Amino acid sequence: MNQYRILVVDDEEDLCEILQFNLETEGYTVDVAYSAEEALKKDITVYNLLLLDVMMGEMSGFKMTRLLHDNPKTANIPVIFLTAKDSENDRLTGFNIGADDYISKPFSIREVTARVKAVLRRFESNKVPVVASQSLVYEKLEMHMENKKVLLDGVEIPFTKKEFEILKLFLENKNRVFSRDEMLSRVWSDEVIVLDRTIDVNITRLRKKIGSYGKNIVTRLGYGYCFEE
């Protein structure tokens, strides 16, 4: 079954029922509204596609679409116009407003379902994947990758770039021991000469900055460092 949700908006109740029945037969979840005003009382953001009549009561489908496109939350929801207004100018108006398709009445149900599938398929293929905001969390210690912030118990701690990279390395690989050479290659890869002592100094500062979690950064004599849970 399809997981898409469709809203049909048309002042012809019989047509709404026919569209609802046939689209639900295809596996879609379908709601109906008999005017643009009624449709706008719904939470439009839950729909993956709108089928709109153009000529309806006081507010036309064109005007409703303009309102939706002015709202960032609904601007990208695909719209198919269903209308008897099938002149070239009407179609151009619909597409200029932002319609994804324009179906002239009378139409066959097979044509509508085929175009619905095509628009949804095209919309899905054009979607830019949303990358979730990355963060590393250990109890009350948080690292936010996007803004490069470290929070301890909700309070931001100032970190240098190297301190941030060391802590990131540890939290991504908890309980793994890193030798000094490994840490140099991962954290100081862009620098020509770095002393082993530089790592020790950064580890000491890092332990102090993360408070009670400093004890989690342990030294394995002869091997290196790790963040131990």
Image (spheres, rainbow, N blue to C red):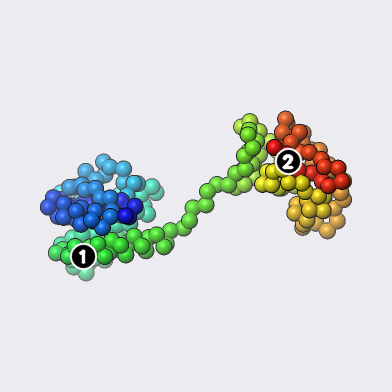
Residue on which the image places disc 1: 110
- Disc 2 crowd, CA 10 A, few/some/many (<14, 14-19, 20+): many
Q: Earlier in the sequence, mark 2 or mark 1?
A: 1
Q: Assign the N terminus to one quadrant of the image.
A: bottom left
Label tally: 2
Q: Is residue 31 above or below residue 211?
A: below
Could you say which is closer to the camera, residue 57 or residue 49?
49
Q: Is residue 15 above or below residue 45?
A: below
Residue 94, given in percent of the width and then of the height, sits at 26, 61
Apparent side of residue 103 relative to residue 171 in the rendered image (left or right): left
Amino acid residing under circle 1: Arg
Q: Secondary structure at mark 2?
A: strand
The quadrant in which residue 217 appears is: top right
Residue in the image at 16% along x and 55% along y: 18
Amino acid residing under circle 2: Phe
Residue in the image at 18% along x and 68% along y: 87
Residue 176, given in percent of the width and then of the height, sits at 73, 46
The answer to whether residue 130 is visible is yes
Q: Assign the C terminus to one quadrant of the image.
A: top right
Q: Secondary structure at mark 1?
A: helix
Residue 166, given in percent of the width and then of the height, sits at 74, 46
The quadrant in which residue 220 appears is: top right
Residue 227 circle label:
2
The quadrant in which residue 103 appears is: bottom left
Residue in the image at 80% along x and 56% along y: 191
- Disc 1 crowd, CA 10 A, few/some/many (<14, 14-19, 20+): few
